[in-house]
Structures are given as structure tokens and as C-alpha cells.
Image: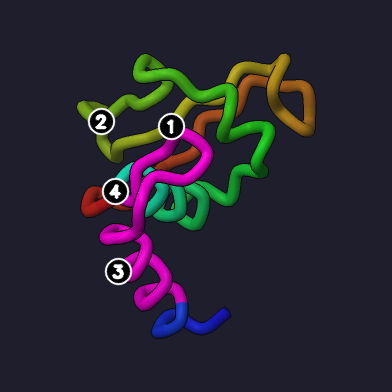
Amino acid sequence: MTIEELQQLVKTTEHAPTWRRMTGTDRAILYRVATGTGYRASELRSLTPSSFRLDDDPPSVALRAAASKHRKDDIQPIRSDL
């Protein structure tokens, strides 16, 4: 997928109706987090609000070992605009 295609997907999804109990806005954010972290679907499902360390420098997302493919705690730095 090109950057332009991803941008179009996110833009379109933001205005999409609710699907599988997620609003279009929530799904668009999920797509951004997925591409910004590289986490897999099961890893994304395990994230909670406390997983997001937005005051860190740089901001990061923490993944517990139990949910990680590598079975180790993982701290993924993210871009500040994410």
C-alpha cells in the first residue's frame, strides 16, 4: 500500500459508519496506530489507555510480553503526530 492509498483509506474510514462496534473515527485511529507501531492485530487488541506513553520523549506505546510475538515487553517509539 502506498502512502497515498493509506491516507485515502484513513480519510474514508473516518467518515464511515460503525462496523463491528467501532466507529469510523475509532477505526481510522486504529489504522494509524497499526501503521505507526507495526503491531499485529492481536497485539493491537491487547493495548489499553495505559499502554500509551504520550509524555515520554519520544512518545511510545508499551506492549506487555504476554501479548508480544517475541514474548518480551516491547516499547515502540511513535511519531509525535500520531
At label 4, counting other C-alpha atoms closer than 10 Å, the crowd grade (few under 14, some 14-19, many 20 or more) is: some
| Residue 9 image-quadrant placement | bottom left
Disc 3 is placed on an element classified as helix
**Disc sitting over residue 54 in the figure:** 2
Q: CA distance from mark 2 to mark 1?
A: 8 Å
Which one is in front, 8 or 35? Answer: 8
Q: CA distance from mark 4 to mark 2?
A: 20 Å
Give left or right: position of 58 versus 62: left
Q: Amino acid at mark 2?
A: Leu
Q: Which residue is mark 3?
A: 11
Q: Which residue is mark 4?
A: 25
| Residue 50 image-quadrant placement | top left
At label 3, counting other C-alpha atoms closer than 10 Å, the crowd grade (few under 14, some 14-19, many 20 or more) is: some
Q: Please, is residue 44 above or below residue 81 in the view?
A: above
Q: Amino acid at mark 4?
A: Thr
Q: Amino acid at mark 1?
A: Val
Q: Please, is residue 70 above or below residue 34 in the view?
A: above
Mark 1 or mark 3, which has the lower sequence index? 3
